[in-house]
Image (tube, rainbow, N blue to C red):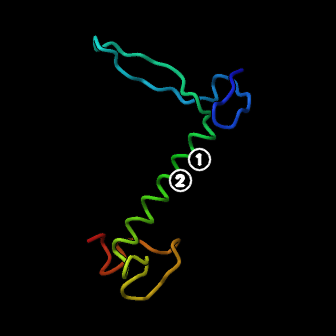
Amino acid sequence: MKLCSKCNEPTDSDGFKIYVNRDKNGKQVRGNRSWCRKCENKKEREARNRLRLEVLSYYGVNGVPVCHCCQEKRIEFLGIDHVNGGGH
């Protein structure tokens, strides 16, 4: 059992994501991250949502995420390829 440094919950070693880096000699070094998978996944999900909102705001109207053709404002339904379709 190992404690997650984020949530302080005891988790078995399989519950931690593995990282692979290279040392100064180019040799692979493997190890476990200090946050459990649940905390790592939550962090990654929040980062994706922040980036998505930033992109949608950039292409919105005056920094507000909104569709230019149908005026949809619900974030769940917005995408940058909606106008003319095809992702262009």
* Image x and y of residue 63, in percent: 39, 76
> In which quadrant will I find the C terminus?
bottom left
Reading the image, the residue beneath label 1 is 42
Instruction: Give amino acid for label 1.
Output: Lys
* Image x and y of residue 26, in percent: 28, 14
Q: Where is 52 relative to 12, above or below?
A: below
Which label belongs to residue 46? Answer: 2
SS category of the residue bearing label 1:
helix
Q: Nearer the viewer, residue 86 or 64?
A: 64
* Image x and y of residue 68, in percent: 36, 85
Residues marked 2 and 1 touching at CB (< 8 Å): yes
Q: Is residue 84 left or right of residue 44?
A: left
Q: Is residue 11 left or right of residue 86?
A: right
Q: For mark 2, does the 10 Å Cα neighbourhood hold few (<14), some (14 to 19), or many (20 or more) residues? A: few
SS category of the residue bearing label 2:
helix
Q: Where is 19 relative to 85, above or below?
A: above
Q: Is residue 41 left or right of residue 68?
A: right
Q: Where is 54 relative to 11, above or below?
A: below
Q: Where is 68 relative to 11, above or below?
A: below
Residue in view at x 34 percent, y 19 percent: 22
Residue in view at x 40 percent, y 65 percent: 54
Instruction: Tally the marks.
Output: 2
Q: Residue furthest left?
A: 88
Residue in view at x 51 percent, y 47 percent: 44
> In which quadrant will I find the N terminus?
top right
* Image x and y of residue 45, in percent: 53, 51
